[in-house]
Image: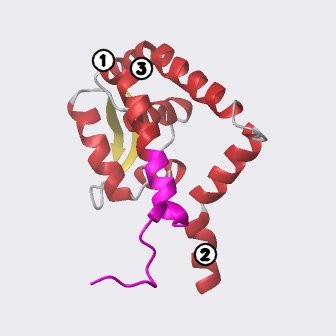
Amino acid sequence: MYDKEIPNNLNDGCIHFIVRSASRALSRLYDSEIECYGITGAQFNILSAINNSQNFNSTNLAKTLNFHRTSLARICRPLVKNGLIDFASKNKVDGRTVKYILTNLGQDKLKEAYPAWKKINEEVHNALTLLPAMKLDSFKNYLQFLGKIDEKLMDKKE
């Protein structure tokens, strides 16, 4: 049964659909460029975040990367298994992870994949600057706002 009140073309106005589609397309681009190094774009971002701040516990890292903690744990599992990251310490009371660290192998993997990541990142930046009347900084600010919109809207509900 067809309901005329429900839009039949998601591209016409569903921000969620449009942003998720764009996100998947970007993920495919980044993943295809660095998959030969045995990691995904999301895993590269995790390695990079840990590299840039050696004081991340799972809560802080999830917040920084805008992941749910359970999603982060799922994505980190292969990184731990492959020896790219490890845990520096665990809470002795409840056994929860306190701090992620980048291993030497993880540091090497990050250095190895970085030129490929940089290449695709520059290509995406260049493509975005070709859009008419589009200022890259404004676009990035808009995306960063969208990355925090759940917090902004949840605050209004409380």
Quick check: 130 left or right of 55? right
Label 2: which secondary element: helix
Q: Residue at x 32, y 82 (%)?
A: 2
Residue 151: x percent and y percent? 58, 69
Label 3: which secondary element: helix
Q: Is residue 58 magenta?
A: no
Residue under pointer 3: 107
Tell me, yes or no, whether the two marked residues, 2 and 3, touch with CB atoms within 8 Å. Answer: no
The CA span between labels 2 and 3 is 37 Å
Residue under pointer 2: 153
Which amino acid type is shown beneath numbered disc 2? Leu
The one nearer the camera, 64 or 156, is 156
Q: Which mark is residue 111?
A: none
For label 2, the crowd category at 10 Å Cα-Cα, with few meaning under 14, some 14 to 19 and many 20 or more, is: few
Q: Is residue 93 above or below residue 135?
A: below
The magenta stretch is: 1-23
Image-quadrant location for residue 124? top right
Q: How is the image coloured?
A: secondary structure
**Which of the image's four quarters has the N terminus?**
bottom left
Q: Is residue 13 above or below residue 70?
A: below
Tell me, yes or no, whether the two marked residues, 2 and 1, touch with CB atoms within 8 Å. Answer: no
Q: Residue at x 51, y 54 (%)?
A: 19
Residue 9: x percent and y percent? 44, 65
Task: Check the image and name the residue furthest to the left.
Answer: 81
Whichever of labels 1 and 3 marks the residue nearer the N terminus, that label is 1
The CA span between labels 1 and 3 is 16 Å
Residue under pointer 1: 36
Is residue 61 at least partly visible in the picture?
Answer: no
